[in-house]
Image (spheres, rainbow, N blue to C red):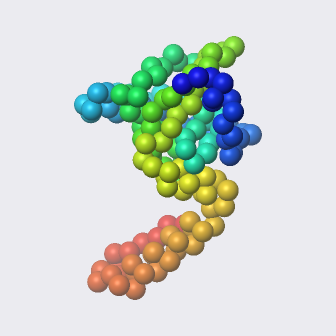
Amino acid sequence: MDNNVIKRRKFDLKHESSVHSLIKIIQINHKRIETKHTKVTLTETNSRGMRFLSSLDLPIDEKIIWNFRLLLREMPISAAGVLISVSKMDEGFEYEAEWIDGVELGRYILDFFMDPYPFISQAIQSYAYFNEHSQNKQNIDLLC
């Protein structure tokens, strides 16, 4: 993809403090594989994907599917995506990744960054519903 196209895209959320993600390759040419994680630093996130910094020279190929693991306000998020561009920096590389799990995942992540309270409220409502309708009420425990 042309770097000029990437520069014209507007990213919705710039990360002022260090937000990290663990990434690893999970699929190549439709074949599942197991690899180790590497830590990257997120710079921007939006509903379509994210940008991140890494000291590693990672392969850019739409046939390579990556897993991105984020910890957003103590809630683990896992997403699949592809790397679509890279820019050489002074100390490493800046990559752009695009979600393949659909736009809804990206919106979920962005909404969570912007306002976590609806998610907390939804979790409390789900817990209340489960507690009310569970036959094993004595086994339900919620740690806060």
Residue 104 percent across, percent down from the top left: 49, 55
Extreme-right residue of the structure? 16
The quadrant in which the N terminus is found is top right
Looking at the picture, does residue 50 appear above or below residue 103?
Answer: above
Residue 37 percent across, percent down from the top left: 43, 30
Looking at the picture, does residue 35 appear above or below residue 18?
Answer: above
Residue 31 percent across, percent down from the top left: 25, 31
| Residue 28 falls in image quadrant | top left
Residue 22 percent across, percent down from the top left: 49, 35
67 sits to left or right of 55: left
Residue positioned 34% across, 33% down in the render = 26
Residue positioned 42% across, 72% down in the render = 141
Residue 69 shows in this picture: no
| Residue 80 falls in image quadrant | top left
Residue positioned 38% across, 33% down in the render = 65
Looking at the picture, does residue 120 appear above or below residue 23?
Answer: below
Looking at the picture, does residue 99 appear above or below residue 103?
Answer: above
Residue 57 shows in this picture: yes
